Amino acid sequence: IVIGLTKSDTLDKKAAEKAEEDARDKLSFAQWAPIVRLSAKTGRGVDVLLRTVDQVGAAFSRRVGTGELNRFFEEVLKTHPPPTSGGKAPRVYYVTQAESAPPVFVVMASDPEKLHFSYRRYVQNQLRKAFAFDGVPIKVHYKARRRRERGQPRGD
């Protein structure tokens, strides 16, 4: 998603900032979407809009390798580990990208249901920031890692 605000040539700086703020309020579900100010009359901002659309299109199809994701996630866990829930913090084992267009990530964890929604949002925002997913809806699914029983062979 790229948001274009037209009629920018008719607004002073303060009014343009207010228009952008109003757009952010109305589109609060997509805070990650870039906003580009445009003027159809003068053509100002059209080049920025087209560059932004190209960047968002590339990000929509971007794949991030599991090794790179896990190095990133290691840093996230060091700086901001999951909060404790019920006396025990859920462990996060690894993250992988399951799909692109749009990007979908899977995080394997112990007790994923105990990861607070605010921590999930934090992880999503960190992924967006670290891998330049601006303008792209990303999904992060949390799954419980199944434990193998003793003596049970590794299977598929």
Image (spheres, rainbow, N blue to C red):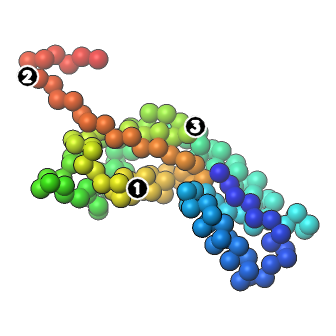
Residue 1 located left or right of residue 66? right
Expressed as whole percent of the image width and height from the top left, the position of residue 113 reads 27, 44
Mark 1 vs mark 2: in front: 1
Mark earlier in primary sequence (1, 2): 1
Amino acid under label 3?
A: Ala
Expressed as whole percent of the image width and height from the top left, the position of residue 29 reads 55, 57
Q: Are marks 3 and 2 in contact (CB under 8 Å)?
A: no
Q: Are marks 3 and 1 in contact (CB under 8 Å)?
A: no
Expressed as whole percent of the image width and height from the top left, the position of residue 55 reads 65, 50
Residue 95 located left or right of residue 20? left
Quick one: label 3, few (<14), some, or many (20+) residues within 10 Å?
some
Q: Residue 43 is drawn in which quadrant?
A: bottom right
Give me the residue at 14% from left, 54% from top. Answer: 86
Expressed as whole percent of the image width and height from the top left, the position of residue 98 reads 44, 33
Residue topped by disc 2:
150
Q: Are marks 1 and 2 in contact (CB under 8 Å)?
A: no
Amino acid under label 1?
A: Arg
**Which mark, residue 101?**
3
Mark pair 3, 1: CA separation = 20 Å
